[in-house]
Image (cartoon, rainbow, N blue to C red):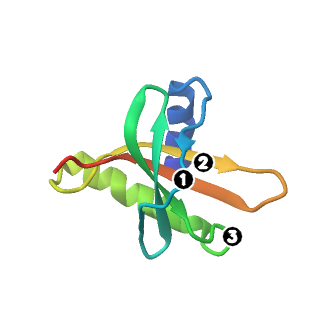
Amino acid sequence: MECRLVANLDLSEHQGAPPVIEEKTIGTGGFFFVHPASWGTQERLVVKSLRDPAAHPEHVYMEAHFHRAVTRLGINHIAPLRGIYTSIEEDTDSDTYKVATVSKK
């Protein structure tokens, strides 16, 4: 629930404008694809999008919760979470994204 509220706050900080998510896949994880993105004036972001949102809709919120905790701890070598964006498209299953900066390490 907390991450859904954070997603709404992040969207309001961008005046309701969604992030620009490129189709190009630059990485993969167990449940995610990673895409380059930008959000408003924030450039060089990456977005982790769920591979199968219909089968695992809760995974993105568990990952977002974990990533928020790691960001607060300031652990090196992990790109800090910059925002959470949720998009629900008509006539499709929920498609959920998490936005994080690209690490410059």
Is 54 above or below relative to 39? Answer: below
Residue 63 place in picture, x, y as percent:
43, 62
Q: Are marks 2 and 1 in contact (CB under 8 Å)?
A: yes
Residue 82 place in picture, x, y as percent:
38, 41
- Categorize mark 3 by other alpha carbons within 10 Å: few (<14), some (14-19), many (20+): few
> Where does label 1 land, which residue?
97
Q: Between disc 2 and disc 3, whose residue precedes?
A: 3
Query: Which sits in the foreground, 22 or 76?
Result: 22
Query: Which sits in the foreground, 5 or 55?
Result: 55
Q: Between disc 2 and disc 1, whose residue precedes?
A: 2
Residue 52 figure quarter: bottom right
Is 67 above or below relative to 18? Answer: below
> Where does label 2 land, which residue?
86
- Categorize mark 1 by other alpha carbons within 10 Å: few (<14), some (14-19), many (20+): many
Residue at the image point whose x is 60% and y is 72% from the top? 56
Q: Is residue 4 left or right of residue 66?
A: right
